[in-house]
Image (spheres, rainbow, N blue to C red):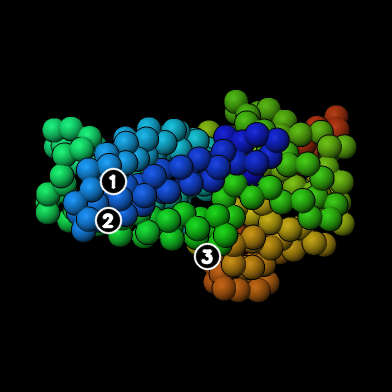
Amino acid sequence: MRSRAQIASHPIHPMLIVLPLGLFLGSWIFDLTGKATNNELLWAASYYCGIAGIVGGFCAAIPGVMDWIGVVPPRSSAKKRGLLHGGLNTLVLIVFIIIAARRSSAIAEPGAFELGLMTLAIATLVISGWLGGTLSYRNQIGVDHRYANAGTWKERSLESWARPACNQSELSEGQMMLVRVADERVVVGRCPEGIIAFSDHCTHKGGPLSDGALVGCTVQCPWHGSQFDVHTGRVVAGPAKNKIDIYTTEIRGGEVYVKPQRDQAPKAA
């Protein structure tokens, strides 16, 4: 899903993470090399790289938190992965702050404790980077999809279910939009048989169906390819095993209204 913190559709977080990554790694290498050669200049370079890395880490964290809150789907594997990713990065920042605070000056020789702590921080940074790559390349967080006939990304927040989700003319066949009502995320789309609405939550890993592809009357999750019938919610193709929730729609005066789950008639057994 497209990043909240972006410049011309380019997410800011990936632009900034290279700064602390490179600086922290450079700080570690400078300290190890300086220790081996007893070079004060390398220790100073390590110290200033660490300070700059801390500043860069805080700058990168801001758009990252914005995306985790506003883009990553709730109750999904990516939400947990993003929390772990951010938590590990926070630990790395804390470690480098502790190391900088323990040094009496920029040219002070790092002790075994500092080097050991820094080595653990770099290992943690590698794991965190792997998680970040999974969020980007597998969960596609921050990706701006532009598949055929999809049009521009549409998203709307409603004050209540009594408000119209959209005008039926806003969506052409194969197009979808994400509608947020309180803590519920509903996808409104148009298939060959008309306007439909269904839960944005893929029952496999919680992927955002609004960011997938609607072909005919079948929607495909962008994460792992699960397919669902948008009229019945049944699974057309796995790996998902459970159906998605379907919402009833009503068109009044050209406006599309979605009924909440509690107002829908119970299904026959």
Residue drawn at the location 57% of the way across and 60% of the way down: 137
Residue type at mark 1: give it.
Answer: Leu
The residue positioned 85% from the left and 52% from the top of the image is 149
Answer whether labels 2 and 1 touch (C-beta < 8 Å): yes
Mark 1, secondary structure of its residue = helix
Q: Would you name the residue on which mark 1 appears?
A: 42
Q: Which residue is mark 3?
A: 204
Other-residue count near label 2 (Cα within 10 Å), few / some / many at <14 / 14–19 / ≥20: some
- Tag 2: amino acid: Thr
Q: Indicate left or right for 46 with 150 as reference.
A: left
Image coordinates for residue 164, horizontal then vertical, percent: 72, 30
Please tell me whether mark 2 or mark 3 is closer to you in this view.
2
Q: Earlier in the sequence, mark 1 or mark 3?
A: 1
- The mark that comes first in sequence, 2 or 1, is 2
Q: Nearer the viewer, residue 90 or 202?
A: 90
Q: Position of residue 236 (x, y in %)?
A: 68, 72
Relative to 180, does residue 242 appear above or below in the rendering?
below
| Residue identifier under label 2 | 33
> Mark 2 to mark 1: distance in Å?
7 Å
| Front tag of 1 and 3 | 1
Amino acid at dot 3: His
x, y (%) of residue 181? 58, 34
Verify CB contact (< 8 Å) between mark 2 and mark 3.
no
